[in-house]
Each structure stands twice: as C-alpha cells, then as structure tokens.
Image (cartoon, coloured by chain):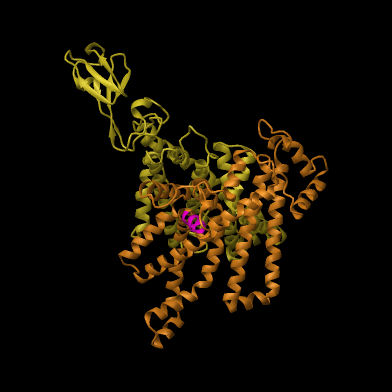
Chain colours: A orange, B yellow
C-alpha cells in the first residue's frame, strides 16, 4: 500500500513537472521574440526586464529550461506584471476563496447527486425517474456561466434571497465572528450551488447505474434472504457503489476547478479563477501560467486522493495494486 | 426508431440545422443593424412596434401613433411628437404605410433583433463546434493510430503525453493558448481542437490494439500489406463507429466551451453574434432585460441536449461502452 501510494505521488509530481515544462515549451514555440510578444501594449515600465531576468532570456535553451525549473522548485514564480507584486503572494490571497467554493460545490455535487440517483432508482421507470432523467440531461447541457446568470436573475434580483456578488457584505468587519462566518456562507451559497449542481447531473446518473447494478447482484439477494428491510438492502447497495463514486468525484475535480473560474467571474469572487481571468485581461503572462500550474496541481492532488481513497475503501483493489 | 432518444435528437437537431442553414432566406432582420435605439432598445419578447413607411423609402419607428385630421399621422418618439403629412407617407391607405412587426424574442440594448441574432449566432457557434470537433477527432485519430499501430516506446510516450494533457484543466489550457496566440474565430477553433483530442486518441488506440490481433488484419499483413495500408484499410474502418459517437458528444462539449470562452470575451469577437457573446451582452442589463441572456442560453442547452441524446443512443445501439458517455466535463 505504502509503495503504491509513493508511486502515485511520484507520478503526480511528474505530471506537474511536465506541465511546467509544457508551459515553457509553449513560450518557446511562440513565433518571434517571446518577450516582446508577451509584453502588454503599451508595455508597463520594467515588466520586460523583470521577465527577462526571471527567465534568464539571454542564456542558451537548456540553461533557460534549467532556470525555469529551478525557479519553480524554490517557489519563485516571478513578479506579476499587472499587480507589481510576487505571483506567489497573489496566489496565496486567491486560493482560500477558491478552495472554499470548490469544497462546498463538491459537497453539493455529492449530496444532490446521491439524492437524485436514489430517488430515480426508487421510482425507477415511473414519471419521477423520467422527470429526473430529463432534468439531469438539461442540467448536463447547461453552460455554467448561464446557469449562474439565471440563478442571479431568479434568486438574486427577483426573489432577493441571496447576494449576487462578492465574498462578504459591506461592513462585514464590524460583525461578530459568528456573524462574519454566516455572512460568508450566505455569499458562497449561490455560487457553490451553481457549480455543484452543474456536475451533480453526471453524478446522479452514475449513482443510478451503480445502484441498479448492485441491486441485481448476489449479495443483494443474500441480504434480502436474511430478511433485511428495504432500507438496509438499499444502504448495502449504496455502500457497494461508493468505490466508483470516489473515482467519479476524482474525475469531477477538473470540472470544479475550471468551473470555479467561470463562477468566480460571474459572481465577482476574488478567487484563483478570477485571478487567472484578470491576468489574461491585463496580458499578465507570469500570473496566468502560474495559475494554470496551480490549477493542474489541484487536479492532480484531487485524483491522487481519489485513487488512494479507492484503495483504502476496497481491499480487492488494494491487493491488486500493491502486488503489481 | 423506437428509442425516444433518437426522436428527441431528431426533433431538436433537424430544425436547428435547417434554421441555421436557411438563415439567409428566412427574411430575418439584419442581426447587427441598430435601426432605432430610441424606440427599439430593450423590447421584451413578443413586442410589436408601430412602423411608418415614408414615401422616400425610409422607415420611422414610433412609441405611439395617432391619425391626423388631414390624412397624415402624428407619432411619438420618446417624449417628442412629430407630424407626418399625408403626402410624405408611402401610400394613401394605412395598410400601405403602417406595419406592426413582431419581435419574438425582443431586442437588446442597441435595439438589435434577438431572434435574428440567435439564429445567425447559431451559424457561428455550430461552425466552431463542428470544426473544432473535427480537428480534435482528426488529431486523436492520428495519435491513436500511431500509438496503437506502432506500439512499444512510441505507444508509451504518446499515451503518457495524453495523460499529461488530460491532467491540465481544459479551460486553463485553452486560456493559455488564447493569451499567447490572440483571439478570434480561427484561434478559437484551433485552441478548442488541440485541447480535446485526448479521448479520441485513447479510443482509437484501444480499438486498434484489439483489432491488430484479429485474423483479417494478420491475413492482410501476411499477404504483404504495408503498415500504412493496414492502418488505413483494416484498422481505420473498425475504429469508425466509436469515433462517430465520440465526435457527436465532442461537438456538444465544444459548443459549451466555445460559449464559455466567448462569454469571457476571449473567443469569437463581437460584433459577431456567437451564443456566448449574446449571453454576455445581456449580463449588464440582466435585471431590466432578462430575455437578452436567456434565449441564447436556451439555444445552447437545446443543441447540446440534442447532441448528447444522439451520442448516447448511438453508443447503446452499437454497444460501445468504451466511449465514455456523459462524463463530467469542463
């Protein structure tokens, strides 16, 4: 198990390394002088010199690659063109809102996905199931930004249940600590719902298929034969399909990370996605490429946890993977 | 055709394709024309507006119309009333000079007709989706064929590369490309295409690996067919059905991503009316004019539902569970 875990961590690090190299290669592939292509127009004072120093622009290519990797290794991601401060500092400020948003969205995704999947199995092939199937299909086909706008329109403007933008109310600092937390949650509710619901459609389909498969298996008949009640049987089946669900959750992570960019732009939340978007708009390449590496790292870490979780949850997989 | 999914897909996709193809002959208003901002701006869906045709061929839009005593007409534009004499009108009877055209989806903040913008926009969005998906499938086909047919180190290297590209969140990859190579129709197509070949490559490789050991391929090889001939004549046809399913699902996903990109202002550039641009147009006036963002979004949803239904139904029919169907996307 430990060896497997170490191997997976190493593989994950390798992927991140490759993405860093990929970013480097993209820059090298640019037609013409990379630095002048990167500079915003008109160039801000000092940005080119800063970038040239950071990338060691005058060195031969292998030294450039070496210094690029070394910079990442020691945590120096350069200086943001538009914000005139170290990229790492910008990322540090932007990460917490994104992590909070993605965590709540993952919770929404799991809870809604499992609930809808359960309901559609319980009412299989009846009107309720078909309605849910149609709903999941529509939800699945919905672009996140549009779902967000519609949510703002209905729950923000018409019903006035939720705030439509930003992370906290004006005057938040004067509230009690508990009030501040509640205020933040209230602001995060709508974005998290939008982000989570978008991916919950796929989740509910997987739960439905998984449950239907488990319900036809021998152990379900055995549980029934033992005289277990309906809920007990269902719970067993659900537990049995938990392992693939972990995998699906791992697959959903890239969606949540990409989706958080869109949601943060729509709801003006000061997270990482918003940072990446601002970086593009300000032609701030150092910041953007750092965002893409960080986003990749998040996804890699997520799929790592999903894999290790699968291993812990299912002894058969653990054995198979440890021996190979 | 008992499967409801086919019926659903046909019901959604056929009218959509017809309308998109026939757009120039549908008698739509010019999607970019800002005919009269004063009267036409932010009209709700199903509005009708009074139009007065003048003798010199021009048209006057009006908030209100009143007949005059001398056969002319008084019309209100904003707060101002203007008189139009009987001689200036396009004809003697009201049916000659008066129209009340319908704005089915309403208009946007520049007085542009939303129906014609959504329909003309469908041409752009569908084109980007089809071209980018074709590029993705082509790339995937090449890489998958190469990996599956060559095997060994080439296979290993290509598949690791595929894994790595898959690990980067797609939107971020597209954003990187767009920020480096500029914006516009061409860049959008290429950026979307080169970031979505991975599933197709894996698929083709899998099919090729399973076909390679089959009797007819070995027979072809034994009778002297070269690797290229084997790949083109014997492996490619076998990989066609799953690729077609993958292509169907990919077009839908690409349309979603293009819309996202255009919504962010990084895809197809205005004034070209792609669906993403239209939703973005309406964002500013969302509380006052909900319809501007709503209708293009509905068009996206219906299109993608149609494509997903089709792909899903084809997958079951050809029994290709290997194609990952409605997986999470982003």
Q: Is residue B263 above or below residue B81?
A: below
Residue found at the far top of this picture: B87
Q: Is residue A227 left or right of residue A259?
A: left
Residue found at the far bottom of this picture: A226
Which quadrant would residue B90 be assigned to in this image?
A: top left
Q: In this view, does B22 lie to the left or right of A106?
A: left
At a point 70% along the width and 68% down the height, the residue shown is: A7
- Does the stretch in magenta take in A181? yes
Specify whether residue B168 is in view. Answer: no
Q: Is residue A82 left or right of residue A263?
A: right
Residue A174 percent across, percent down from the top left: 52, 52
Q: Give the range drawn in magenta.
A: A179-186
Report the front residue among B14 and A298: A298
Report the front residue among A113 and B219: A113
Residue found at the far left of this picture: B69
- Magenta highlight: main SS: helix
Q: Is residue B327 left or right of residue A8?
A: left
Residue A205 percent across, percent down from the top left: 44, 64
Report the front residue among B4 and A251: A251
Q: In this view, does A258 lie above or below A205?
A: above
- Does the stretch in magenta take in B228? no
At a point 53% along the width and 64% down the height, the residue shown is: A249
Residue B239 percent across, percent down from the top left: 54, 57
At a point 51% along the width and 61% down the height, the residue shown is: A106
Specify whether residue B159 is in view. Answer: yes
- Quarter of the figure that contains the N terminus of chain B: bottom left
Q: Is residue B135 above or below residue B182?
A: below
Residue B22 percent across, percent down from the top left: 38, 36
């Amino acid at each position: 198990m430990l060896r497997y875990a170490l191997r997976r961590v190493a593989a994950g690090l390798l992927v991140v390394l490759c993405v860093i190299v990929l970013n480097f290669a993209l820059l090298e592939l640019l037609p013409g002088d990379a630095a002048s292509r990167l500079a915003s127009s008109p160039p801000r004072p000092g940005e080119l010199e800063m970038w040239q120093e950071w990338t060691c622009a005058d060195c031969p290519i292998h030294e450039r690659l070496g210094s690029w990797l070394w910079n990442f290794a020691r945590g120096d991601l350069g200086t943001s063109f538009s914000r005139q401060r170290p990229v790492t500092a910008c990322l540090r400020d932007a990460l917490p809102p994104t992590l909070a948003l993605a965590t709540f969205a993952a919770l929404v995704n799991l809870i809604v996905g499992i609930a809808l999947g359960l309901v559609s199995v319980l009412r299989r092939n009846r009107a309720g199931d078909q309605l849910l199937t149609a709903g999941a299909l529509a939800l699945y086909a919905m672009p996140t930004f549009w779902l967000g706008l519609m949510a703002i329109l209905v729950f923000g403007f018409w019903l006035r249940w939720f705030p439509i933008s930003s992370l906290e109310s004006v005057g938040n600092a004067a509230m009690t600590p508990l009030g501040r937390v509640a205020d933040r949650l209230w602001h995060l509710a709508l974005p998290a719902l939008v982000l989570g619901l978008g991916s919950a459609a796929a989740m509910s389909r997987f739960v439905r298929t998984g449950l239907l498969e488990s319900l036809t298996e021998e152990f379900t008949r055995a549980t029934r034969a033992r005289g277990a009640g309906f809920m007990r049987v269902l719970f067993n089946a659900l537990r049995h399909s938990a392992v693939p669900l972990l995998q699906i959750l791992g697959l959903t992570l890239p969606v949540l990370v990409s989706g958080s960019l869109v949601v943060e732009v729509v709801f003006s939340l000061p997270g990482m996605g918003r940072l990446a978007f601002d970086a593009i708009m300000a032609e701030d390449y150092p910041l953007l490429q750092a965002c893409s590496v960080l986003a990749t790292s998040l996804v890699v870490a997520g799929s790592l946890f999903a894999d290790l979780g699968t291993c812990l949850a299912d002894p058969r997989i653990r054995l198979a993977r440890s021996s190979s | 055709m008992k499967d409801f999914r086919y019926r659903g897909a046909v019901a959604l996709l056929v009218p959509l394709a017809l309308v998109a193809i026939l757009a120039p002959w549908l008698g739509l208003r010019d999607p970019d024309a800002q005919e009269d901002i004063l009267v036409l701006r932010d009209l709700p869906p199903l509005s009708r507006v009074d139009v007065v045709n003048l003798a010199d061929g021009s048209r006057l839009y009006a908030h209100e119309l009143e007949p005059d005593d001398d056969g002319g007409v008084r019309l209100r534009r904003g707060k101002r009333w203007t008189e139009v004499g009987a001689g200036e009108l396009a004809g003697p009877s009201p049916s000659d000079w008066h129209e009340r055209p319908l704005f089915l989806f309403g208009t946007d903040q520049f007085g542009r007709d939303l129906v014609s913008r959504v329909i003309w926009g469908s041409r752009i969005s569908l084109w980007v989706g089809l071209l980018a998906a074709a590029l993705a499938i082509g790339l995937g086909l090449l890489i998958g064929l190469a990996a599956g047919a060559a095997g060994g180190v080439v296979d290993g290297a290509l598949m690791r590369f595929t894994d790595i590209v898959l690990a980067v969140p797609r939107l971020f990859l597209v954003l990187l490309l767009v920020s480096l190579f500029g914006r516009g129709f061409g860049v959008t197509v290429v950026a979307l295409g080169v970031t979505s070949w991975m599933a197709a490559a894996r698929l083709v490789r899998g099919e090729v690996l399973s076909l390679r050991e089959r009797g007819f391929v070995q027979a072809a090889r034994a009778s002297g067919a070269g690797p290229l001939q084997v790949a083109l004549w014997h492996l490619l046809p076998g990989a066609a059905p799953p690729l077609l399913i993958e292509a169907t699902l990919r077009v839908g996903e690409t349309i979603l991503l293009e819309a996202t990109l255009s919504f962010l202002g990084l895809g197809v550039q205005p004034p070209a009316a792609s669906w993403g641009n239209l939703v973005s147009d309406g964002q500013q006036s969302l509380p006052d004019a909900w319809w501007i963002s709503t209708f293009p979004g509905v068009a996206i949803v219906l299109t993608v539902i149609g494509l997903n239904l089709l792909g899903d139904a084809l997958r079951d029919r050809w029994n290709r569970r290997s194609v990952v169907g409605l997986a999470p996307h982003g």
